[in-house]
Every structure is written in structure tokens, then in C-alpha cells.
Image (cartoon, helix red, strand yellow):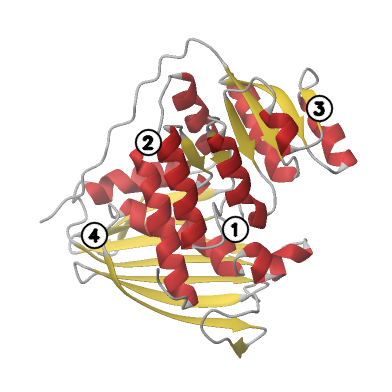
Amino acid sequence: MSTIAVTKPVAFHLTKRSRLGFLGLGWIGRHRMKALLDAGVAEAAAIAEPRAECMAEAAALAPDARQVPSLEALLEESLDGIVIATPSADHAGQAMRALARGIPVFCQKPLGRNHAEVKAVVDAARNADRLLGLDLSYRYTAAMERIRPIVAGGNIGQVHAADLVFHNAYGPDKPWFYDPALSGGGCVIDLGVHLVDLALWTLGFPKVVDVQSHLFAQGDTLPPDPATAEDFAIATLTLESGAVVRLACSWRLNAGKDAEISAAFYGTEGGVALRNVNGSFYDFIAERFRGTACERLTSPPDDWGGRAAIDWAARLASGIGYDPQAEQFIDVARVLDRIYGRKQS
């Protein structure tokens, strides 16, 4: 029986709170800023947001933060790091500009619209020896924190199948999401990025030897590398071990609930799964399966949304520079490109 090596959590010894700049302060940007401030691992030194109402709400959360008009103005501040929560088309360029100035970055997903953009950002972080974080937040749910060690330790035997789903009854509320030139794609890059990451991360980032996919928009089949944002997608990943990972994601699916989110892993000696509760976007359980028996491992409540940012900020305050685990972001982006049928560089 093979097992997956898991790096033990790093013990952090914080001697100071990091001075952070925040770029983009819509709902997600404000949520991550509040999580960081509430955790006591950082202070908001400066904030930048073009929408007056969002800036006002952010200033209420961080009244001592300096309000500046742009990324360039942020980069002139004395910062230990920057948190980026802007539209997807801007992520790679903004991250690289910060890294070129020697400023570590925590970015919303996707890090780039394609593999080439993501690789360029990771290369920039490596060259600058600066910590790069990405908001792959579902890794930090209590459910996945229980599931991954079980899989990694070989406790469900040899994993031969995984099924991951993210169906969202609603579509994004901003027009740029529906333009692949700006967003990088549709539901796959918006939601499927989490599924690809959870599958590969849980299984120890195995080599993916084959990818088959089907993309749809309003029920119509899309060609490879579509110019239209897909609203439904199914993909099958075949791993070097022979294991098969099946992924499905969508916007505006008639699923009878707000959301259907799950990540299940099946082995020769059992299975484990994350599942959302009652259609919730935020409440999850973890379960372990042995034949027909089901054991509950975790239950809500679980305030997981800001943990990826908090982990990055704690590492930053501890003096950690470039983390080679950022290479995983490239692996995920490469699989996303294959799902889209893009030419591989």
C-alpha cells in the first residue's frame, strides 16, 4: 500500500504583526482583511479601492489605514506584504509588480488566467525570494484538515477514484466574469480551480497523464479553448497510478438548492468525503466510510474562510521567504488549461 508524504504544520513564532496593503476591497477583500485583523497577525497599513462605497466600508474596518488611489501608491508605502482581491485579469500583472518591488503577495484565485500567467507569477516570487500565497480556502476547512491525513496515511487503502463537485445555483454578478479574455474562463476557473486543487493536494500532487472534458454554455457544447464562458463542465483526470478523478462544476444549475459541494475519495479499504450541509456555501461535514457504515468526523460551525490568508500572514511574520509549494499553483493551472483544451506550452 502506498502512502503520501504530508509536511507537518510549521510552528510560527510571531514577533510582530505584518504591515499589509490591501488592493481590492469588495466583499471578499473586506472579508479577508477583517479575518487577518481579527486574528491579530497583521495590521492594515494602506488600502486601495476605486469604488467609494467599498472604500468606506473598508475604512470602517481599518480606520487607521492610509487610503491610497492605486497599486502604485500602495507600493510606495512601507509594507511587509500585499493582499490582492481585484478582478481576475489583473491578478498576475499586479502580483508581479509587487514582487518586483520585493513585496510578498497573497492573491485571490485564480492567480492567472492561464498556465503561462501563473508560472510567470511563481517565477517572479522565486526570483525575488518572497512568499506567495493563493486563496485556496477549501484546503483550510476543518473537514479537509481531517480528510487529507486519512488519505495520506493510507488509512483508506489505495485510492483509485475521487469525485468532486461544485454546483452554484447563481452566476457571478459582475460582467467581466462572462468574458474569458478578462476572467480566463467560466465556472471551471471560478469554481473548478478549487476542485482540481483539492483533488491534487489531497492525493499528494500526482502526475496527471490524461484529461478529458466537456464544456457547455446554456446547454450548448463548446469547442476547445472557447471564446464563451462555460456555465457547466465535466472533466475526468487520469493519474499516473491509474486512479481516476471526476470533476463537475456549474453556474446557475437547477439543483434544487443554493449549492452542491463535495469532495469524495474512495480507496480499497474505505472512503472519506467532504459535503456541504443543506445547500450551504459555508457549512461542511466530513465523513468516513467503511462498507455501509458512515462515521461523522466534523460538523459545523467552522469559521474557515480567512484561514488561508491568516496562514500566509503568519508565515510572512515569521520571516519565511519563497515557499516551493507555490509550484503547486502551476500544476493546478496546467490541468485547468487541459480542461479548457488549450495548447500546452
Give the quadrant of residue 238. Answer: bottom left
Q: Is residue 265 left or right of residue 78?
A: left
* Residue carrying label 4: 270
Q: Mark 3 or 1 closer to N-term? A: 3
* Residue carrying label 2: 323
* Residue carrying label 3: 67
Give the quadrant of residue 17. Answer: top right
Q: CA distance from mark 4 to mark 2?
A: 33 Å
Which quadrant of the rendered structure holds the N terminus?
bottom left
Q: Residue at x 60, y 21 (%)?
A: 42
Give the quadrant of residue 39. Answer: top right
Label 1 near label 3: C-beta < 8 Å?
A: no
Note whether 156 is above or below 212 in the view shown. above
The amino acid on which the numbered mark 3 sits, given as a three-letter code, is: Gln
* Residue carrying label 1: 278
Secondary structure under tag 3 reads strand
Badge 4 crowding class, 10 Å Cα cut-off, few under 14, some 14 to 19, many 20 or more, is many
Q: Position of residue 169 (x, y in %)?
A: 67, 68
Secondary structure under tag 4 reads strand
Can residue 10 be seen here? The reply is yes
Q: Position of residue 48 (x, y in %)?
A: 76, 35
Q: Residue at x 49, y 32 (%)?
A: 312
Label 2 near label 4: C-beta < 8 Å?
A: no
